[in-house]
Amino acid sequence: MKILMTGATGLIGSALCQRLKLADHTIIGLSRSPQRAGKLAVDELLKWDGQSLLAPEMLAGVDAVVHLAGEPVAAGRWTAARQQRIRDSRILGTRSLVEAMRTAAKQPTVLVCGSAVGIYGDRGDEELDEQSAPGTDFLAQVCQEWEAEARRAHVAGIRTVEVRTGVVLASDGGALKKMLPPFKLGIGGRLGNGRQWFPWIHLDDIVGLFAFALQHTTLNHPINGTAPGLVTNAEFTAQLGQVLHRPTLFPVPRFGLKLLLGDMAAVLLASQKALPKAALEAGYKFSYPNLTAALEHLLG
């Protein structure tokens, strides 16, 4: 297939490019700054600002589109301007991309669009699958609008899969890289009371799910991009400490997170027991369904 990918330079995107190139697909990457992309497993890297309508030639001969672009959610305190960038980068970007797909001389056959388990909001111990109702907080609202824009492709007859990604664990980036320094020093600990569910997934499996969604023609709906073996934040903390052979005796209180991060602290304190029901039912086999094996693989 000839695949157009936004967000190709990100954590998931760069790994997905490698996976798809190994399967002999042709990859056209889109990036705001292609000159700074470094070595990326793509056949061509084009410039796109993330919101403008794509030029028709960018979609020429394209069979599938993977849409991963978006302002990072956990990169800093949520000011009003930052929240607007988080929203616009997803809503306006997806709208422009889908409009270009809808009006292309030859429509791509499938859109696999990023989304997030943040769509469910803070739900305590409730088990959540793809049929669960959405939440009402800022991220939940953004995700709902984001998926609504992607669904316009479905209305136009393009198979559409929204991958509701959890916390991606990787050895060289993402959340785990940010967590490691205090844990390696023996000063890591749970966040808040630690009872909130932690919807994690190994990088290999989130990449596998995107590739699976591209190929699996019966998928035409959202899927949760989380591992089956979900844990609470306290359980994650304990298992990370065990793998690193370090104590985990220094919890970060809720009020401390809110002082440090403002409204963005809600992302770390929210509880989402989001299970990958749709992926399992479709036949996806997780390489790392359980946390301990995933951490041991990632941390050597």
Image (cartoon, grey):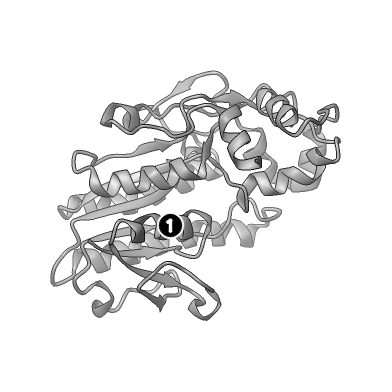
Side of 172 where 286 appears, left or right = left
- Vertical position of residue 254 compared to residue 52: above or below: above
Image mark count: 1
Give the quarter of the image for residue 122: top right
Q: Which residue is mark 1?
A: 68
Residue in the foreground of this view, choosing between 288 and 46: 288
Q: Is residue 198 visible?
A: no
Residue in the foreground of this view, choosing between 261 and 240: 240
Residue depicted at x 86% and y 36%:
187
Residue depicted at x 48% and y 28%:
289
Residue depicted at x 13% and y 68%:
106
> Which SS class for mark 1?
loop
Crowd band around label 1 with a 10 angstrom C-alpha radius: few (<14), some (14–19), many (20+)? many
Q: Is residue 260 visible?
A: yes
Give the percent coordinates (x, y) of residue 82.
Answer: 62, 60
Q: Quadrant of the N terminus?
A: bottom left
Give the percent coordinates (x, y) of residue 22.
Answer: 35, 58
Residue in the foreground of this view, choosing between 43 and 156: 43
Residue type at tag 1? Leu
Q: Quadrant of the C terminus?
A: top right
Give the percent coordinates (x, y) of residue 13.
Answer: 45, 58
Give the percent coordinates (x, y) of residue 247.
Answer: 83, 28
- Vertical position of residue 277 compared to residue 46: above or below: above
